[in-house]
Image (cartoon, helix red, strand yellow):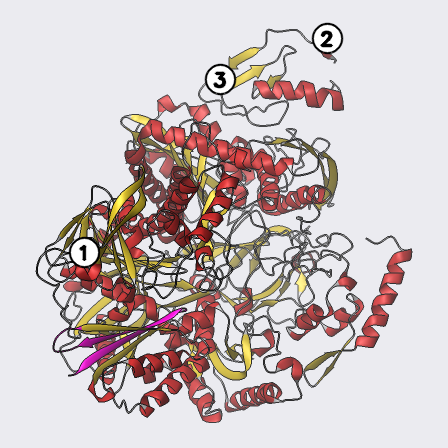
């Protein structure tokens, strides 16, 4: 899957909204940190812990490793 | 007229205080110290004294000889005898690092060489039962091993191992040898160590032997070994010092016994001091706190923080409800602990000679590096060019360049200025601002040391007075006292000689400890009562040996913890023998005490009793201070520009000896005397009491 | 430098110093409270806990000298915990606990407790203690489930739950904990010690707030963090820009054992540093995996070793450092991966990898690898004297690596921790296991111009019918690396001599465990002896350049044997009757030979 095939979304913060009994954990797709409550969803649907990680993904990751990571 | 003489030998000066027992008159003599043979300066001072040797009723010495020996690693070659398999304990230490993020730290070597650590095939278990006893042949083997070491040490052809050319980094010199013995579980069962001591003494009568169960009968083999090594390390040196001083005293026809200050604020006879150097590490410093307590009491203060600022360091101590606080933890440096009863005080590298510098983050720091006495602060004009606290005080007009140490040292204000200016350039601040910042950082460092002794232990500084002494104590006291929120500042007469004076005030004190780990549900009260009585009697005997013939004070304490914990809290044992009736009260005291510190109690838990301690004290009679002069208030002798909050201010200068009883001086003002300078900030008032104390409400 | 003296809000230097010292003082006091009140020697002697103060957003304000593995991770743990539960769910007197490795923790035994500190009715910040509990249930006594393949075997895993509400016990959760831990009495005492540390810190922080007010203190803290961050950036800027690559592996003790590879690219760009572990191996069914907290801690730990130790250690110092650790790999384990040894064994290896990369940038500040194993030895059973169940987490020191200007320290705890050892006398008083020897291992330090530190040997003998032991060791196969031509440190060993036999055997030989270094639940009995030999530190620089006098002193002190002085350092010595002398001529010849041999080979 490459960038073009991803469904474009409006980037922004979303709240994780799981039932109280669901205790699983998700991680930032750039740095790997846990995302405790608020998730930054990028325009290509990737989930980051912060806007900075979105930026890092584009300035550091993509040029180095290409888009096929996720 | 009989007189008491107290001496304090420090790194720079040897101070002698004479107290006329009839009139209470005090006179003082200050001599440069003679670190190569500290006794020489003492004898010189005595020769300068007006008191005839046969008129000296008491002679007490406070000394930093042991402290310096340990800090400078100048001591004996120690042979360390220990349980086989554990010869490396002094090297293994406790495996933690000084700072968690500091790759540069170098673990200190112990005060012994590795091949001088000798194992003997013996073993005691944790209950104190001997599992493997030393046999006669084991003892003979040990003696043979030691003889081989001694021969090698004294063999003049053995250059690498001998004499001053010896470059061993451990610090022990080769020409003096001492033995340290530390067997596992000696704090439970000291008999195997005693047997070894007796054997070694008979085989090697010239070698001092320190055994761990005497020196520090504590749990944890490394701390005990480190303490025992320190004791042995300093013994030949201390012995030499005391014997040499004794010979000098004999020559002066001084025929009475004399005493040395202990780290715990008590005293011991010189002959005993020779055998237990580890108890005199803070010998000089503890006298200062004793003096602080005395002056506090004169001013009606039971809660006192003592502040002693000298040339290279500042010592801070605390007196609560008229009592000095004690601890058993001290260290030569991180990783080399010494465990001995000592007065709880904080020493920090912040004195007049402390150097101001900028760390890599651009933040101004003061100390712990010191310009010392040589070259000293820049203003000494002896070649030092680093800016120091004294230089900052000169720049701010607080120190009189012509009256430093009674005019013995002339200060050069222009050198102070240029040193401070250079620092200011780096900081981007002007001369006065830089000097002010140096003083403030110093004051804050000192204040933090005071908080560690008070706030951090749940003591509220608002209930404390600061007793300020040492050459620079009264210069910084008001600012420091305000920073921690203390009530008043008390400035005694002769602030620079308070430590020497303190030696004349100290009581005799003997501590005895018995480690006996026992659970509250299986306790043998009769056995404990018997042993407690023995401890009391031993302590009383020693007190008498030290020359005390009055009514002693006796205190009994036990340390306890919840079964499973490794640290204890100490509580007093109620008077009389422990009984089925009084023992539950003791346990309840523990629960209450524990809850006060930790905020909870574990009612249903078993309590473990660990160490029983007996302290006996013999009070000495306290001198009365000569009253302050009465009459019309002393007038200022001078005026000069001095920096206070808000800038340079015209300031009155008084002489201490002119001040009369009841006089009040409003700040801004400065009081100068031979050995110290008192700073009175604007808005503060210094009141002179009938005893000659100066008191400021802050 | 003068540009660094200002602060964003203009807090003066004196106030910065005072407030920083007071905050650090709070952390210290929390620590001494914990030490004194705790039941397990892992706390009272080994101090395996860290106490930290945070602001209301979970930003770290101060720490003290605790375990670097914990203080590096607790920064995430608390921030994420507060974000996850929401501070509106808290009220005064609440204490929340969790030990979830996937929530920023470092491994399951580490329990974090936090308490909000209120001032004038509002939360000002949090005090937290992260502590290694000695028994947490799971497949083996002592919290190290060495053979675990999934997190569920590693013990009782708590998500964020309330331990106290409004100062009252939440009894349900206490009962769950007491039911699942093997030594509940110890858990009871240790959890109370943790609570006591929070109570002390809460009072002290409120005292500071009385001096400065909430807003005043926040402003000062912001300046403190800006100051630390700026200082750290100055330090990073001083390192040459570039990309520095380093890789190394660790044996994972699966059956058959495999090497897991860790690949690191450090990017220094101006005043920022990126540590990118992309390309490291996928996580595996074993305990060597690292959580994100472990990996980030290891990076912080290595970088902070190289910079000025006076930088205030608050959140600001970590901000210029970015750690990239792809989820699902050995450097960022996700559910259900196990991770208990990642914190003790893999952390030091990661630390050495980071230093290996940075040694290319700042060779004058780096150090060779440390022994790099906590040498975790766990045991439990019923004490014959008291009939009480006990469990102990035993760890050892290792040799540290030689440095540009000094030898490595001997017998020092791994860089991820800063725990003192348990004294022999305390060990034997608490457990039916007596020690017969504890000593330095001669020649265990890697030879170099600056020698690696020595490691140790300890022999212990069982004095009870039944004791259950487990172990997680590392460094039995690969020597801890030397740097710049130096040799590696000695490898580690863990062996057992069954009662009535003469020989020390590996646990595989004696018990058929699949690994010599990681096994669980082996039963030992009266007279069995266990010998632990820990790994030594790597050397730094060419051994034959070591000062001859230093080699002589090493021999004199018996740190190095006469044989190794000759073979590895080229210093030919003679012993006669306990005297050691250097043969200058033979030494010169031997060293010339070594130099010539190195010239044709590719050493250095």
From the viewer's perspective, is the residue at label 1 or at label 3 nearer?
1
Whether residues under marks 2 and 3 lie with C-beta atoms below 8 angstroms apart, the answer is: no
- Is any atom of residue C290 visible in this view? no
Task: Identify the residue under disc 1.
Answer: B694
Q: Is residue B419 above or below residue B37?
A: above
Write down the chain letter for disc 3: A
Write down the chain letter for disc 2.
A
Question: Alpha carbon of mark 1 to alpha carbon of mark 2: how far?
Answer: 86 Å
Q: Between marks 2 and 3, how big is the CA–CA gap?
A: 28 Å
Tell me which residue sits at (38%, 69%) in the image: B218
Q: Earlier in the sequence, mark 2 or mark 3?
A: 2
SS assignment at label 1: strand
Q: Main secondary structure of the magenta part?
A: strand
Asked if residue C531 lies left or right of residue B317, the reply is right
Q: Mark 1 or 2, which is nearer the eye?
A: 1
Q: Which corner quadrant of the image does residue B406 belong to?
A: bottom left
In the image shown, does C588 or B110 lie closer to the viewer? C588
**Residue C336 is drawn in which quadrant?**
top right
Looking at the rendering, the stretch of residues picked out in magenta corresponds to B1-25
**Residue at screen point 50% across, 49% down:** C142
Q: Residue at x 32, y 88 (%)?
A: B249
Give percent across and percent down for residue B656.
21, 59
Q: Nearer the viewer, residue A54 or B565?
A: A54
Write down the residue under mark 3. A18
Q: Residues within 10 Å of mark 1 (few under 14, many from 20)?
A: many
Q: Which of the image's four quarters has the C terminus of chain B?
A: top left
């Amino acid at each position: 899957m490459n960038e073009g095939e991803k469904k474009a979304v409006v980037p922004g913060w979303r709240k994780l909204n799981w039932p109280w009994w669901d205790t699983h954990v998700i991680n930032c797709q750039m740095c790997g940190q846990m995302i405790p409550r608020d998730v930054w969803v990028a325009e290509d649907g990737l989930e980051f812990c912060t806007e900075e990680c979105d930026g890092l993904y584009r300035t550091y990751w993509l040029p180095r490793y290409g888009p096929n990571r996720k | 007229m009989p007189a008491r003489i107290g001496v304090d030998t420090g790194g720079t000066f040897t101070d002698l205080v004479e107290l006329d027992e009839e009139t209470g008159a005090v006179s003082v003599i200050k001599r440069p110290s003679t670190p190569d043979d500290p006794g020489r300066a003492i004898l010189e001072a005595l020769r300068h004294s007006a008191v005839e040797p046969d008129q000296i009723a008491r002679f007490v010495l406070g000394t930093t000889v042991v402290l310096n020996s340990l800090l400078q690693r100048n001591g004996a070659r120690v042979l360390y005898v220990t349980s086989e398999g554990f010869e490396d304990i002094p090297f293994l230490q406790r495996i933690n690092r000084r700072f968690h993020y500091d790759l540069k730290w170098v673990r200190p070597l112990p005060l012994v060489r590795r091949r001088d650590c000798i194992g003997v095939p013996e073993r005691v278990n944790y209950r104190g039962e001997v599992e493997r006893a030393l046999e006669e042949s084991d003892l003979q083997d040990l003696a043979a091993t030691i003889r081989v070491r001694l021969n090698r040490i004294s063999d003049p052809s053995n250059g690498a191992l001998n004499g001053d050319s010896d470059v061993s980094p451990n610090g022990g010199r080769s020409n003096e040898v001492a033995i340290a013995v530390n067997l596992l579980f000696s704090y439970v069962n000291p008999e195997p160590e005693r047997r070894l001591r007796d054997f070694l003494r008979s085989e090697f009568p010239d070698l001092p032997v320190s055994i761990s169960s005497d020196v520090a009968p504590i749990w944890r083999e490394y701390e005990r070994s480190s303490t025992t090594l320190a004791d042995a390390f300093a013994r030949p040196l201390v012995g030499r010092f005391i014997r040499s001083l004794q010979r000098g005293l004999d020559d002066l026809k001084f025929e009475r016994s004399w005493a040395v200050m202990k780290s715990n604020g008590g005293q011991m006879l010189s002959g005993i001091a020779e055998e237990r150097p580890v108890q005199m590490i803070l010998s000089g410093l503890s006298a200062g706190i004793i003096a602080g307590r005395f002056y506090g009491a004169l001013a009606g203060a039971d809660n006192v923080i003592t502040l002693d600022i000298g040339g290279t360091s500042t010592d801070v101590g605390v007196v609560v409800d008229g009592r000095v606080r004690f601890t058993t933890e001290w260290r030569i440096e991180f990783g080399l602990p010494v465990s001995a009863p000592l007065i709880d005080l904080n020493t920090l590298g912040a004195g007049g000679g402390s150097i101001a510098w900028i760390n890599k983050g651009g933040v101004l720091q003061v100390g712990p590096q010191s310009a010392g006495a040589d070259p000293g602060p820049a203003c000494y004009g002896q070649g030092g060019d680093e800016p120091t606290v004294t230089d900052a005080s000169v720049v701010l007009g607080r120190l009189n360049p012509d009256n430093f140490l009674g005019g013995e040292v002339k200060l050069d204000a222009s050198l102070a200025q240029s040193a401070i200016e250079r620092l200011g350039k780096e900081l981007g601040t002007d001369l006065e601002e830089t000097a002010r910042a140096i003083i403030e950082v110093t004051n804050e460092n000192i204040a933090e040391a005071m908080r560690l002794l008070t706030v951090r232990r749940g003591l509220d500084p608002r209930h404390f007075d600061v007793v300020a002494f040492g050459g620079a104590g009264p210069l910084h006291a008001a600012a420091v006292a305000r920073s921690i929120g203390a009530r008043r500042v008390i400035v005694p007469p002769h602030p620079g000689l308070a430590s020497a004076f303190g030696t004349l005030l100290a009581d005799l004190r003997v501590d005895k400890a018995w480690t006996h780990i026992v659970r509250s549900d299986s306790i043998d009260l009769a056995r404990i009562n018997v042993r407690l009585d023995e401890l009391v009697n031993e302590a009383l005997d020693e007190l008498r040996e030290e020359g005390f013939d009055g009514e002693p004070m006796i205190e009994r304490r036990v340390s306890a913890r919840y079964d499973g914990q490794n640290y204890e809290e100490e509580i007093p044992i109620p008077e009389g023998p422990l009984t089925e009736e009084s023992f539950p009260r003791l346990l309840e005291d523990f629960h209450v005490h524990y809850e006060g510190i930790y905020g909870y109690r574990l009612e249903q838990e078993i309590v473990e009793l660990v160490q029983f301690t007996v302290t006996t004290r013999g009070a000495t009679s306290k001198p009365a201070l000569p009253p302050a002069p009465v009459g019309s208030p002393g007038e200022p002798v001078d005026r000069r520009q001095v920096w206070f909050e808000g800038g340079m201010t015209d300031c009155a200068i008084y002489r201490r000896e002119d001040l009369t009883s009841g006089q009040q001086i409003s700040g801004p003002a400065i009081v100068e005397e031979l050995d110290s300078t008192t700073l009175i900030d604007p808005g503060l008032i210094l009141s002179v009491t009938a005893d000659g104390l100066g008191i400021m409400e802050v | 430098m003068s540009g660094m003296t200002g602060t964003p809000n203009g807090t003066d230097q004196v106030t910065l110093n005072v407030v920083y010292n007071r905050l650090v003082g709070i952390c210290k006091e929390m620590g001494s409270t914990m030490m004194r009140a705790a039941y397990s020697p892992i706390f009272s002697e080994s101090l395996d806990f860290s106490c930290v103060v945070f602001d209301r957003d979970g930003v770290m304000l101060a720490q003290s000298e605790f375990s670097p593995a914990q203080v590096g991770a607790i920064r995430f743990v608390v921030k994420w915990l507060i974000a996850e539960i929401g501070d509106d769910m808290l009220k005064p007197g609440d204490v929340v606990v969790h030990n979830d490795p996937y929530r920023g923790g470092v491994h399951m035994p580490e329990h974090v407790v936090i308490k909000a500190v209120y001032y004038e009715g509002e939360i000002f910040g949090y005090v937290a203690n992260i502590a290694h509990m000695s028994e947490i249930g799971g497949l083996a006594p002592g919290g190290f489930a060495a053979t675990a393949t999934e997190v569920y075997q590693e013990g009782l895993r708590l998500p964020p739950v309330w331990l106290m509400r409004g100062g009252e016990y939440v009894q349900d959760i206490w009962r769950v904990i007491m039911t699942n831990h093997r030594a509940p009495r110890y858990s009871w005492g240790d959890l109370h010690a943790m609570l006591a540390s929070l109570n002390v810190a809460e009072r002290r922080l409120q005292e500071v707030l009385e001096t400065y007010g909430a807003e005043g203190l926040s402003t000062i803290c912001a300046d403190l963090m800006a100051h630390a961050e700026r200082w750290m950036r100055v330090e990073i800027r001083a390192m040459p820009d570039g990309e520095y690559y380093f890789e190394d592996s660790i044996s994972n003790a699966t059956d058959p054992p495999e090497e897991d590879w860790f690949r690191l690219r450090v990017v220094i760009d101006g005043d920022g540093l990126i540590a990118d572990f992309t390309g490291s191996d996928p996580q595996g069914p074993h305990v060597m995996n690292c959580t994100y907290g472990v990996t980030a801690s290891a990076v912080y730990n290595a970088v902070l070793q190289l910079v000025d130790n006076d930088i205030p250690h608050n959140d600001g110092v970590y901000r210029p450092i970015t750690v990239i650790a792809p989820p699902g790999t050995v450097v960022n384990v996700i559910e259900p991966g196990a991770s208990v040894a990642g914190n003790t064994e893999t952390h030091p290896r990661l630390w050495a990898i980071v230093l290996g990369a940075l040694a290319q940038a700042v060779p004058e500040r780096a150090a060779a690898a440390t022994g790099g194993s906590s040498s975790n030895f766990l045991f439990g059973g019923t004490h014959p004297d008291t009939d009480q169940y006990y469990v102990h987490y035993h760890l050892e020191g290792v040799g540290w690596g030689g440095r540009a200007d000094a030898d490595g320290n001997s017998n020092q705890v791994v860089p991820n921790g800063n725990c003192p050892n348990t004294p022999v006398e305390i060990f034997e008083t608490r457990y039916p296991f007596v020690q017969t020897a504890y000593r330095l291992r001669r020649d265990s330090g890697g030879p170099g111009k600056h020698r690696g530190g020595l490691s140790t040997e300890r022999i212990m003998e069982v004095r009870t019918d039944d004791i259950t032991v487990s172990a997680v060791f590392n460094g039995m196969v690969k020597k801890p690396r030397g740097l710049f031509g130096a040799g590696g440190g000695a490898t580690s060993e863990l062996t057992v001599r069954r009662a009535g036999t003469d020989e020390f055997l590996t646990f595989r030989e004696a018990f058929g465990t699949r690994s010599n270094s990681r096994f669980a639940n082996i039963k030992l009995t009266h007279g069995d002896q266990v010998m632990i030999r820990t790994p030594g530190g790597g050397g730094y620089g060419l051994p034959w350049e070591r000062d001859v006098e230093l080699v002589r002193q090493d021999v004199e002190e018996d740190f190095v044997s006469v044989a190794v002085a000759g073979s590895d350092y080229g210093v030919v010595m003679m012993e006669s009757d306990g005297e050691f002398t250097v043969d200058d001529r033979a030494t010169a010849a031997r060293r010339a030979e070594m130099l010539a041999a190195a010239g044709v080979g590719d050493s250095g």
